[in-house]
C-alpha cells in the first residue's frame, strides 16, 4: 500500500517526448516499510531526538513509502491517521497492493477469485502482485487492463516457475517491486535461518541497470509509477532506492548520515559532503556483504 508524500514528486521524470502530448508521468521511488529494528545505526540514528518518527524521517529522502504492515494485519485507523499527520501532505493514497504468494497459480478457480477481489475493492486504485509464472499470459494482462488494475513488475529469485522480470503497465498506475535475489533463503523453511535473511541482498549497479530501463518503459505508459525496494535488511532497500533515483533522474540525492557511513559507495551520488569526516577512505570499510 504505497503512500504518496505529496502531489508532486521530488525525483520525477517526464518520459513524453512530444510537446503536445499528455503531461509527463510522475515517478516515485521509495522503500517498503519503515519499522525495522536492524535499521538503527544504518538508516536511523542510534540516538533519536525527542519526537522522532521513522516515517517522518524517511520523508526527507523519499516521496513514497509502501505501508506493508497491512500484509500482516488490518491497519488501525488511528495509526493510519497518525502516519498521515507525520508526513507532509500525505493524505493521498497511491494504490492498494493485492499481493499473492508463489503458491497462487493461475487456474479457473484462482482467476475467478482474483476477479472477485478486484470487484470487491474496485473503489481503490489496485495493483496485483503474483509470483508464479502461470500468470505470465495475455489473458492475465487483459483481465487487469479491462478492470483498470495495474500489474506489479517484480524482481525475485527465479526458482522453478517463478515469474520473471517484466515492464508491463495495464492501468494509469505503474508498479515495480524489487525483493532481492537471495536464492539460498527465498523458499527456505529452515528454522535456524533468521527471517530477515530472505531480504538480505544489495543489488549491484549492474543488476539495477536493466530495471532502470524497465522503469522508464513503464513510465511511458503509466500516469504515475511507483518503484519500491523490499530488500530491507540493514537498510539495503534504502541504498538501492537512492541509487535508482540517481540513475533515473541524473541528479544527486540526499543521503541519511548513518547510511553513508555504513555504505561509503553512496558518497558518489550524495548531494552534500558528510556531516562528519568518514572513518574509512571512500570505497572501503563497508559492512555490506554481497549475496
Image: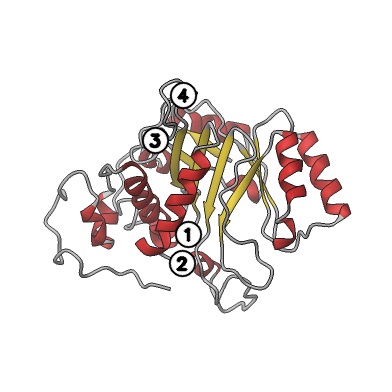
Residue located at (70% from left, 56% from top): 136
Q: Are marks 2 and 1 in contact (CB under 8 Å)?
A: yes
Closer to the eye: label 3 or 1: 3
Residue 71 pos. (x, y %): 64, 49
Question: Is 99 above or below relative to 173?
Answer: below
Q: Secondary structure at mark 4?
A: loop
Closer to the eye: label 2 or 4: 4
Q: Which residue is mark 1?
A: 231
Residue located at (40% from left, 61% from top): 234
Q: Earlier in the sequence, mark 4 or mark 1?
A: 4
Q: Nearer the viewer, residue 291 or 56?
A: 291
Q: Earlier in the sequence, mark 2 or mark 3?
A: 3
Closer to the eye: label 4 or 1: 4
Q: Which residue is mark 4?
A: 23
> Does residue 204 show up?
no
Distance from Cα at disc 4 to Cα at disc 3? 11 Å
Disc sitting over residue 250 in the figure: none
Tally of numbered discs: 4
Q: Is residue 113 left or right of residue 232?
A: right
Amino acid at each position: 500500500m504505497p503512500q504518496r508524500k505529496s502531489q508532486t514528486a521530488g525525483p520525477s521524470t517526464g518520459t513524453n517526448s512530444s510537446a503536445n502530448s499528455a503531461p509527463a508521468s510522475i515517478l516515485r521511488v521509495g522503500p517498503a516499510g519503515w519499522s525495522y529494528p536492524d535499521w538503527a545505526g544504518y538508516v536511523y540514528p542510534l540516538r533519536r531526538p525527542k519526537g522522532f518518527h521513522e516515517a517522518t524521517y524517511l520523508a526527507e529522502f523519499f516521496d513514497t513509502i509502501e505501508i506493508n504492515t497491512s500484509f500482516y494485519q488490518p491497519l488501525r485507523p488511528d495509526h493510519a491517521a497518525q502516519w498521515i499527520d507525520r508526513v507532509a501532505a500525505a493524505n493521498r493514497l497511491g494504490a492498494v497492493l493485492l499481493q499473492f504468494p508463489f503458491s497462487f497459480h493461475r487456474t479457473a478457480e484462482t482467476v475467478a477469485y482474483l476477479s472477485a477481489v478486484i470487484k470487491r475493492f474496485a473503489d481503490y486504485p489496485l495493483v496485483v502482485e503474483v509470483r508464479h509464472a502461470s500468470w505470465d499470459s495475455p489473458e492475465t494482462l487483459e483481465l487487469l487492463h479491462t478492470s483498470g488494475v495495474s500489474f506489479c513488475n517484480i524482481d525475485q529469485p527465479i526458482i522453478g516457475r517463478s515469474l520473471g522480470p517484466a515492464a508491463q503497465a495495464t492501468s494509469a498506475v505503474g508498479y515495480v517491486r524489487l525483493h532481492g535475489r537471495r536464492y539460498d533463503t527465498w523458499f527456505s523453511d529452515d528454522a535456524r535461518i533468521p527471517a530477515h535473511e530472505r531480504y538480505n541482498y544489495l543489488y549491484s549497479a549492474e543488476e539495477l541497470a536493466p530495471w532502470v530501463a524497465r522503469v522508464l518503459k513503464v513510465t511511458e505508459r503509466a500516469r504515475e509509477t511507483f518503484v519500491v525496494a523490499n530488500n530491507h535488511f540493514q537498510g539495503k532497500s534504502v541504498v538501492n532506492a537512492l541509487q535508482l533515483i540517481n540513475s533515473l533522474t541524473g541528479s544527486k540525492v540526499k543521503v541519511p548520515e548513518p547510511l553513508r557511513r555504513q555504505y561509503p559507495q553512496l558518497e558518489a551520488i550524495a548531494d552534500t559532503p558528510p556531516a562528519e569526516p568518514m572513518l574509512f577512505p571512500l570505497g572501503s570499510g563497508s559492512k555490506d556483504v554481497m549475496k
